[in-house]
Amino acid sequence: WQRHPGKYSSPTKFVEGRLVVPRFVLHELQRLADSDDDIKRQRGRRGLELLKNMQKDPAADVRIHEDDLQGNEPVDLKLVKLAKLMDARICTTDFNLSRMASIQGVEMLHIHDLVNAVKPMVFTGEEIEVRLVKDGKEPNQAVGYMEDGTMVVVSDGKRALGQTVKVSVTSALQTQAGRMIFAKLDR
């Protein structure tokens, strides 16, 4: 995202400015979309589809940056170099890109940080409802997910697999992948 030009404000009003997509990023998305690996292919196609939808939004100022940077460097390194040259921020869901760019002084907008910041807080002792959908890693554990996708690990929950149950929160853990809640089955 360029900070100054343009008037684009995302539908959530969290991001304003011009979205600049380097041509080499488009090439990378196309390479992924053509991949033999199903997961890479889906990610590439989803990225191209999201970009297409943003271009259709009349409030969006989306520009394709045609100039490529010299060299055979990976896309992430080129992206950081270009952001520095343009005095722009990088908006990403890629944790490693975010870390690398931050170390080099490029301001980051990390989507997962935003998602985690707006998730509802839960506190020890709080009672929540969750549908238990699979076994946990430890014996007798079960796992469920809150509406926002937060994983809930329930001790002694295996006997209630497939059911929606009330559980009491025993602790919460923030990880790089998101938040995990640990709970016990209410008797």
Image: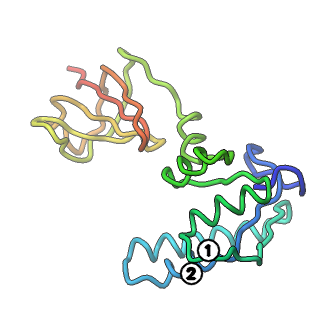
Q: Which secondary structure, mark 1?
A: helix
> In x, y percent, where is residue 64?
77, 73
Q: Give the class, few, some or many, for how many residues have Cα within 10 Å of label 2's Cα (few <14, many ≥20).
A: some
Q: Which residue is depicted at the point 77% across and 61% down?
A: 19
Q: Please state which amino acid type lies under the numbered disc 1.
A: Leu
Residue lying farthest top? 125
Q: Nearer the viewer, residue 54 or 17?
A: 17
> Looking at the rendering, in which quadrant would you find the C terminus?
top left
Q: Quadrant location of residue 36?
A: bottom left
> Looking at the rendering, in which quadrant would you find the N terminus?
bottom right
Q: Which secondary structure, mark 2?
A: helix
In the rendering, which numbered label is found on residue 114? none
Q: Give the class, few, some or many, for how many residues have Cα within 10 Å of label 1's Cα (few <14, many ≥20).
A: some
> In x, y percent, where is residue 33?
51, 80
Q: Please state which amino acid type lies under the numbered disc 2.
A: Gln
- Above/below status of 181 relative to 78: above
Residue assigned mark 2: 30
Q: Are marks 2 and 1 in contact (CB under 8 Å)?
A: yes
For marks 2 and 1, the one nearer the N-term is 2
Q: Which residue is depicted at the point 36% across and 34% down?
A: 180
In the rendering, which numbered label is found on residue 48? 1
Q: Which residue is depicted at the point 40% across and 36% down?
A: 175
> In x, y percent, where is residue 157?
19, 33
Residue lying farthest front? 71
* Front: mark 2 or 1: 2
> In x, y percent, where is residue 17?
83, 53
